[in-house]
Image (cartoon, rainbow, N blue to C red):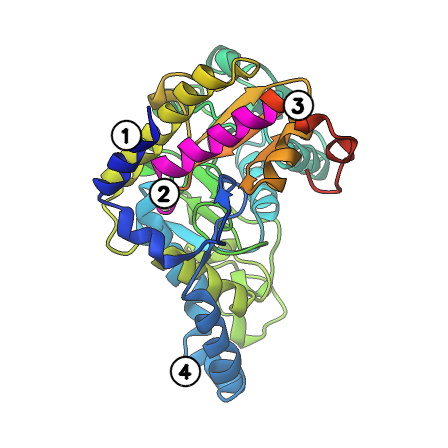
Amino acid sequence: MTLTEAEALDAADPLREFRDRFALPEGVIYLDGNSLGALPHSTPARLQAVATGEWGEGLIRSWNAHDWIGAARRVGAKIAPFIGARPHEVVVADSTSANLYKLLVAALKARPERKTILSEPGNFPTDLYMADGAAWSVGDARVRTVPAADIVEAIDDDVAVVLLTHVHYKSGAMLDMGRITAAAQAKGALILWDLSHSVGAVPVDLNGCNADLAVGCGYKYLNGGPGAPAFLYVAERHQGTLRSPLSGWMGHAAPFDFGDDYAPAEDISRFQCGTPSILAMAALEEGNAQFDGVDRAALFAKSRALGDACIALVEAHCPDLTLISPRDATRRGSHVSFRHPDAYAICQALIDRGVIGDFRAPDALRLGFAPLYIGFADLWRAVDILRQVLADGSWDDPKYHARNAVT
């Protein structure tokens, strides 16, 4: 692909107008939307309105007047179409980690004769950490990991819940949700999907796959801002039986009756816990609003095409890098990773030149494509800068080898 060809693809892109909805700094090519989505232009004004109007003037009346109390369900309902769920099956609450804990413990308690949480080694660390914490909390449970390719065969009569990430955070490999879900349920296990690197970038159909449970974050492709609230999904059939171990007042059937005894709500609300951050909810709602009017088929097709183009350009111009992501776009999320022994230093050199990707230990350079605002010419220019950095050896400057606290 030449720059002229890339520019032609951008000119024909049905999503090109959506780029203008985001505040993208001049001279920066942002290939890290899979870790933190770009700021929508409309978000600061929304936050200002909530802070000065709803909070400053409305004060506590805004829980009713501006439906603060309904924000968790309202924003969850707006996320639902992106994950193939019904509006009443999704709620926004807490963090991805906290939601993992809630659903893992609930699943273990629902299968008391089974003691195993099954996952894969190399899953996103917080998933494995929270699985460890959930097993410890229950007391007689354990975590077992097997390679993703062996998950189906490893599901036995002791597995209570299978915990997997739909799109792997490092490699971008996408698992077959339908096949694995069916296999888990055939063995009597529940399945919990982490959609953090999927929602807003690749097709997800939880209801179509008959999935049981899912979680995901709001700060990546949903553009909710740093530390944005997460969401969780519980299939309608489980909402009356699974119980959250974090029995906070927002999960109570009647939180404003202020009774001493806990009675969980009968619906998805039972998986809320404490009082939500209304400012954070507003930012996530505004981030999600950037998808208004978007043709999701075109969005997902562009995501795949950007990944294909990235692989082709890097392999043509940067032979020192080795692809570790699936080559088949139907088996890949919206980021591509390459291996190099000095990937960290290369990443820092790129950032210094305005190309922001990220590094994942021990040796992966990861480039992500938020299809609402990344174009093919962006990608061409980014790979050209990568080619220059590798060719002139500028990445080997000692300052690029010094590790930052956040990599």
Amino acid type of the residue tagged 2 in the rendering: Arg
Tell us which disc is closer to us: 4 or 3: 3
Q: Residue at x 45, y 65 (%)?
A: 43
Tell us which disc is closer to us: 4 or 2: 4
Residues at marks 4 and 2, CA–CA distance in whole angstroms: 32 Å
Q: Identify the mark at residue 5; answer none if there is no mark.
A: 1
Q: Rate crowding at label 2 as few (under 14), some (14 to 19) or many (20 or more) other CA atoms within 10 Å.
A: few
Q: Residue at x 33, y 23 (%)?
A: 1
Question: Who is closer to the viewer here, 148 or 303?
Answer: 303
Q: Is residue 152 left or right of residue 116?
A: left
Q: Which residue is mark 2?
A: 237
The picture places residue 206, in percent across and down from the top left corner, at: 35, 36
Amino acid type of the residue tagged 1 in the rendering: Glu
Q: Is residue 45 left or right of residue 134?
A: left
For marks 2 and 3 on the same chain, the one whose residue lies earlier in the sequence: 2
For marks 1 and 2 on the same chain, the one whose residue lies earlier in the sequence: 1
